[in-house]
């Protein structure tokens, strides 16, 4: 039986960083990976470009997360500056894009992974090693004995990367409900005719929750940053747990297509314009407010002839038009589960020490990354969680 000081279970970004940090102080570190290669999900992030983190000042960054108090110590232990220096010291530089998103200058996730692999030179990497059991005294699969174990097995999204709901049963740690996060929505209506069209800077509403951002139409429903970020609140509001059952999805979302106008402002503008531009067809007039390629679909949905002249639109139709511009509704029938980016829920944070990532119930057992009940919006926030908690877990385990 092979013996190690520290065994890290899972070769994603959290597990890799945990192994790197652990190897700084421990000579015998093993990284156990189910696949034949490391970092499969890392390679997929940011559309293959790897949105590695978000450059907001640390206090503003923490305020983005529902679990900011838990994350505080890990974020200060591995700051953005320290994280990026891992790669800059190896010659890789970074660029900043809108919303403070940070990408490698080469725009290749593979360059991030390549450098991480260099830091793993002193770590024993066991590929094609699926951890099925961790028993007392940290005997793993009856093959490996470790003094300490760091679990970084990820969530339930992208199962092709090695994530599996069974990983939550590797330890006896209490769990919160497991749910889909950052997930596109499937609509009742077929949207294939407008697939690829984007609505820019609109407001999406679900109950009292609102998010401003872009909406992209897919063949089966709605996606884009605005939808993806709102989906976390939607998923959390539905009573389900993937350990027991899939969600029963049936709700409505509404899109404010003209967020910079109130209903009264639209009404005043329409009153003036419908008189002064009476011969203009409504489909041409709406180019002032809507993406051109979306107009025909919109008018067809609200049953207004696209070629109707403004002067021929009566008061009832005008009010109907205004109401739909301010609240264009879609019935949602399911989550597009195969495209969920993160998992909501996981190891209950109440039973993990945020200053070390060590279990409060089982000494020398640590957790990092998405397996914990941690999540954030799109924009580099979730990789930041993975790297920071992984680094803290590895450092803590090696120093104890």
Image (spheres, grey):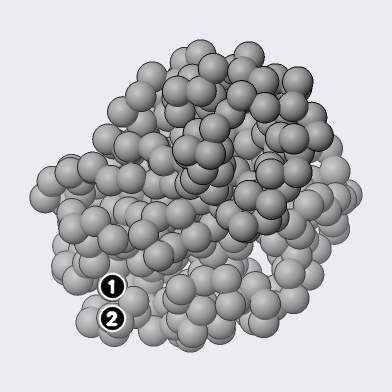
Instruction: Name the residue located 22 percent from the left edge and 67 percent from the top edge.
Output: 175
Q: Image height check: is 359 above or below 170? A: below
Q: Tell me the tag on residue 278.
A: none
Indicate the position of residue 206 as horizontal and vertical percent values.
Answer: 39, 55
Judged from the image, the secondary structure of the residue bearing numbered disc 2 is helix
Instruction: Name the residue located 18 percent from the left edge and 58 percent from the top edge.
Output: 239
Q: Image height check: is 60 above or below 283? A: below
Q: Which residue is mark 1?
A: 348
Instruction: State left or right for residue 203 relative to residue 137.
Output: right
Can residue 209 be seen?
Answer: yes
Could you give the CA–CA distance between mark 2 and mark 1, rounded to whole angstroms?
A: 6 Å
Q: Which residue is more in the foreground, 64 or 397?
A: 64
Q: Which residue is more in the foreground, 302 or 311?
A: 311
Q: Which residue is more in the foreground, 141 or 48?
A: 48
Q: Which residue is mark 2?
A: 351
Q: Are marks 2 and 1 in contact (CB under 8 Å)?
A: yes
Can residue 25 be seen?
Answer: no
Instruction: Name the residue located 27 percent from the left edge and 35 percent from the top edge.
Output: 333
Instruction: Name the residue located 28 percent from the left edge and 81 percent from the top edge.
Output: 351
Indicate the position of residue 366 as horizontal and vertical percent values.
Answer: 37, 71
Q: How many neighbours does mark 2 have within 10 angstroms: few (below 14), some (14-19), or many (20 or more)?
A: some
Instruction: State left or right for residue 296 relative to residue 330.
Output: right
Q: How many neighbours does mark 1 have within 10 angstroms: few (below 14), some (14-19), or many (20 or more)?
A: some
Q: Which residue is more in the foreground, 361 or 51?
A: 51
Indicate the position of residue 362 as horizontal and vertical percent values.
Answer: 24, 79
Judged from the image, the secondary structure of the residue bearing numbered disc 1 is loop
Q: Image height check: is 387 above or below 258? A: below
Instruction: State left or right for residue 358 relative to residue 275.
Output: left
């Amino acid at each position: 039986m092979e013996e190690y000081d520290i065994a890290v279970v899972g070769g994603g970004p959290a597990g890799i960083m945990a192994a790197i940090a652990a190897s700084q102080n421990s000579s015998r570190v093993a990284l156990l990976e189910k696949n034949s290669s490391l970092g499969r999900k890392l390679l997929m992030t940011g559309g293959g470009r790897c949105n590695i983190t978000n450059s907001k000042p640390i206090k503003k960054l923490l305020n983005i997360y529902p679990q900011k108090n838990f994350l505080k110590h890990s974020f200060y232990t591995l700051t953005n500056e320290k994280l990026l220096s891992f790669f800059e010291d190896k010659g890789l530089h970074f660029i900043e894009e809108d919303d403070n998103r940070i990408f490698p200058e080469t725009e290749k996730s593979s360059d991030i992974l390549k450098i991480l692999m260099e830091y793993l030179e002193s770590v024993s990497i066991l590929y094609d090693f699926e951890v099925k059991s961790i028993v007392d005294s940290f005997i793993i699969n009856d093959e490996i004995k470790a003094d300490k174990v760091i679990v970084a097995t990820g969530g339930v999204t992208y199962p092709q990367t090695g994530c599996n709901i069974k990983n939550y049963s590797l330890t006896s740690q209490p769990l919160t409900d497991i749910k889909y996060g950052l997930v596109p929505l499937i609509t009742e209506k077929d949207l294939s005719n407008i697939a690829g069209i984007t609505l820019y800077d609109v407001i999406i509403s679900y109950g009292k929750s609102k998010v401003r951002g872009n909406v992209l139409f897919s063949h089966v429903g709605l996606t884009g940053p605005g939808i993806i970020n709102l989906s976390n609140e939607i998923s959390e509001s539905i009573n389900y747990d993937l350990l027991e059952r899939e969600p029963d999805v049936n709700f409505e979302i509404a899109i404010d297509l003209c967020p910079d106008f109130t209903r009264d402002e639209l009404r005043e503008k329409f009153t003036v314009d419908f008189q002064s531009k009476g011969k203009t067809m409504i489909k041409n007039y709406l180019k002032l407010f809507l993406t051109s390629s979306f107009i025909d679909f919109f008018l067809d949905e609200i049953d207004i002839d696209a070629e109707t002249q403004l002067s021929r639109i009566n008061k009832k139709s005008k009010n109907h038009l205004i109401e739909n511009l301010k609240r264009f509704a879609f019935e949602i029938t399911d989550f597009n589960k195969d495209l969920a980016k993160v998992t909501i829920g996981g190891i209950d944070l109440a039973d993990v020490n945020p200053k070390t990532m060590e279990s409060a119930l089982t000494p020398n057992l640590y957790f990092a990354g998405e397996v914990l009940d941690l999540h954030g919006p799109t924009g580099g926030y979730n990789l930041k969680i993975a790297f920071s908690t992984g680094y803290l877990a590895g450092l803590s385990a090696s120093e104890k």
